[in-house]
Each structure stands twice: as C-alpha cells, then as structure tokens.
Image (tube, rainbow, N blue to C red):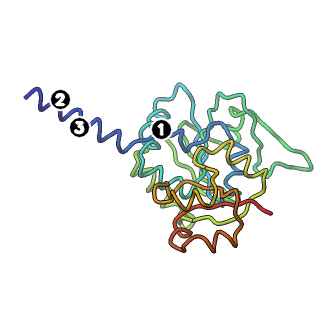
Amino acid sequence: MKKFLLFAILAIICATAFFAINYTDYVLVNEHDSSFEIARILDKNLILLFSQESCHDCEEIKNNTLSNIELSNFLKSRFVITEIDIRSKNIGTYPLFGVIMGKKYQYNYSELYKKYDIKRTPSSIVFNSEKKQLGIIERYKTVEEYRAELVSMKNSLVMKQKKLLKSITDTERKLLTEKVKYVHETSLNEFINNHDSLNQNDIFILTDADEFLINESLESSILNNFNILYLKQ
C-alpha cells in the first residue's frame, strides 16, 4: 500500500511538472518601456503584471497560473508580457505616448504603480498594440479564470492569434534578441531542416533571407503556423 501511495505521489509530481514551465521563459522582467516597443514590433497585445516580492498571490500567479504550459502558449501567441516589480528602481515613461506640452515624463516603478491607479498586487493591465488600455485583471487568478477574463474583455477580437511574416530593422533585431528569450536567429536552411521540432509559438528571425526567398522556399502550411521575421534590406 505504501509503495502504491509513493508511486501515486510521484506520478502526480511528474504530471504537474510536465504541464509546467518557468514563467521567466516568456515573461519579461522590469521592461516597462521596452515591452511596448516589442509589442509594436511583433504586432501583439501587451500585459503589464504589477507585483512585489512580499506578495504571496504574486508568487502564486507567476509560479502556478503563468507557468502552465497551455496558458503560456496561448499568451505567447497573442501577448508580450512583462512583470513590473513595484520596488524596482527602474524608470518608465508615463503617459504611454511620453510627451505632454513638449516634455517627456519618467517615473520609477513605484510611482508608475500609482500613475496607473492600481490598488493591489498582483494586477495585470492589458493593452493592445496601439497602447490602448483594454482592461485590468486584479488579484490571483487560476489558469481558467485568467484566460476567461482576457477573452471576455470588450475588445476580445484582439485575442485572435496572429502569425507574423514581416521585416524588421537591425535595431529592432537587437532589441528582440536581447530581451525576448523565445526569439531565435537562424538561417533559412536551418529553419527548413528543423521546423518539425520547433515551437510554433516562438519567433524566428531568418538572417539570410528576404520575403521573396521565404515565400519561394517555404510551403504555405509552414508560413501559416510560424512567426517569421527577416531583416530589411
């Protein structure tokens, strides 16, 4: 009986691990201004997750909800997400367009927390790629609750998954590869040879191809299932 119980416990642990990832594999950390630029480049919506170290619910939402592999794939395909630690000394721009009467205003993250009029942590503010705020998710939410709140927002049409095929500048390439762990640089041939084993929610920069060569070399089924970027000539 004891052996059976031990086996059952191990099976539960293994099953949980199988359906979990490290949320930092796709969530940026303390990148307020950069995350808006990254969302613009990738034509994705944005979630700012405000948290703090002493917050138990913050740890729960990061290590349980956002670490669920199914939810992470849903989020990666539609959003750029950044965690904002309100105790960080990092600086962010507010309002989002950055200029009032010819001046640019910047604040530390504790001040930004107040500027966004957030009442508690964790809180997730949701924006579209044009920086329009769509809604806010407050307190800890389970995987099902978090996804349901996103889908129920009045602009739910923006929740549709978009696959990329677009050009980027070298400056944009450097930003993406420096900040986003699921952006990968590869050659066209390497991508063709290995695409069956690649995560379709990751983003791939083909460093040696233009749009014409990509369309000539890749089948439509591949183009429709992968996020592909290439450098402007």
Identified at 12% across, 32% down, the residue is: 4
Which one is earlier in the sequence, the residue at label 1 or at label 2?
A: 2
Q: Earlier in the sequence, mark 1 or mark 3?
A: 3
Q: CA distance from mark 3 to mark 2?
A: 9 Å
Q: Amino acid at mark 2?
A: Leu
The quadrant of the image that shows the C terminus is bottom right
The CA span between labels 1 and 3 is 20 Å
Instruction: Name the residue at 83% across, 41% down.
Output: 105
Q: Amino acid at mark 1?
A: Asn
Q: Residue at x 57, y 35 (%)?
A: 51
Q: Residue at x 54, y 70 (%)?
A: 224
Q: Which residue is mark 2?
A: 6
Q: Which residue is mark 3?
A: 11
**Quick one: SS at disc 3?**
helix
In screen coordinates, is 188 left or right of 97? left
Closer to us: 204 or 24: 204
The residue beneath circle 1 is 22
| Quadrant (top left/top right/bottom left/bottom right) for the N terminus | top left
Amino acid type, callout 3: Ala
